[in-house]
Image (spheres, helix red, strand yellow):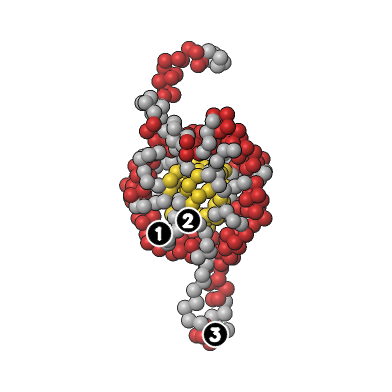
Amino acid sequence: MSNLKTNYLGLELKNPNIVGACSLTSDIQHVKKMEEAGAAAVVYKSLFEEQIQLENLELEQSLSAYDERHAEMLRLFPGLDHAGPEEFLHDLSKAVKSVSIPVIASLNAVYDETWPQWAARLEETGVAGIELNFYQAVTSFEDTAKEIVDKRVEIIAEVKKHVKIPVVAKLSPYYTNPLHVVKKMDASNASGFVLFNRLFQPDIDIEKVAHVYPYNFSNPDDHRLSLRYIGLLYGNIKGDLCAANGISDSADVIRMILAGANSTQIVSSLYKNGISYIAEILAGIEDWMDRQNYKSIDEFRGKLSHKMLKDPFAYKRAQYVDILMKSDKILKDLPIL
């Protein structure tokens, strides 16, 4: 029988399948079903700073309503400071205790000083690691690429000072040079990298003449961008690599491991096929390993990474070169007028 164990963030996982942060992972019953189906770990739904700020504002408004009527009570409790989304932290702690597989927290803050503050609070829940979800759309015309990257690197370094558990950077592919970004974050001792997060973009309803915010699931081909960068990064950084976005089936998981990933994250495929689909993915990996005579994940991890290949075009200009050299064959069946 194939051994699917893999090491990610210093954690020995029973297989490479991690359920990524989503609404499903905020439900303890769903998390239990994920463990039963074979998930190696889950990333709990992200804590967004907007959520923290909203609760703080609501509490401040509630307290201010009593300023005049209960002044003596306020003197008894000077400087009362709301601790934030306590219900979220409580539920996360319950999720950690409800399963035997690792539960990883996910944090998306806004202000530099709140990243380490809330990372420390999340660590208190007993999570196995913290994923810093750098999900932020750039809207400023003044911020330079260097300033944006330097801030992210500083955040990682500061969070590392405040927690003892592994710290992972979940990145978007929209940096000027993602390879350089990962290299700099790796130098700041990030424990690993999740490539890539999925930025939900606004759309416009032309009939209502209004913005709409559709929930778009990933598509099967979305995994290719993650595959390319993981293939280029493997063997060149200290941190571990986790592939996300467009991981649809067992073949995608295998592809990512061949490129050099330690693990993969699945989300959209569970919404489309149900939580039990995890078992089907694992069965597909085992079947492939048996047919290829692999006994363990480590035997083929990184086998098709850039570092292990002699073909200089595989992760660079292969598609363009292929089209140039074989254009007649590739295009002959297309309905070109």
> Where is residue 306 shown, x and y percent of the image?
39, 32
Q: Quadrant of the C terminus?
A: top right
Crowding around mark 2 (Cα neighbors within 10 Å: few <14, some 14 to 19, many 20+) is many
Q: Nearer the viewer, mark 3 or mark 2?
A: 2
As helix, strand or loop, the secondary structure at mark 2 comes to strand
In the picture as drawn, the residue positioned furthest to the bottom comes out as 72
Q: Nearer the viewer, residue 112 or 143?
A: 112
Residue bearing mark 3: 73
Going by the numbered disc 1, the residue's amino acid type is Val
Residue bearing mark 1: 159
**Are discs 1 and 3 less than 8 Å apart at CB?**
no
As helix, strand or loop, the secondary structure at mark 3 comes to helix
Q: Is residue 174 above or below residue 317?
A: below
Residue bearing mark 2: 130
Q: Rounded to the nearest whole Å, what is the CA distance between mark 1 and mark 2?
A: 10 Å
Residue found at x 58% / y 36%:
285
Q: Quadrant of the N terminus?
A: top right
Q: Is residue 49 above or below residue 36?
A: below
Residue found at x 46% / y 15%:
327
Q: Where on the picture, by quarter, is residue 320?
A: top left
> Where is residue 6 shown, x and y percent of the image?
50, 44
Q: Rounded to the nearest whole Å, what is the CA distance between mark 1 and mark 3?
A: 36 Å
Q: Earlier in the sequence, mark 1 or mark 3?
A: 3
Mark number for residue 51?
Answer: none
Q: Nearer the viewer, residue 264 or 174?
A: 264
**Are discs 3 and 2 less than 8 Å apart at CB?**
no
Going by the numbered disc 3, the residue's amino acid type is Met
Crowding around mark 3 (Cα neighbors within 10 Å: few <14, some 14 to 19, many 20+) is few
Q: Is residue 188 left or right of residue 265?
A: left
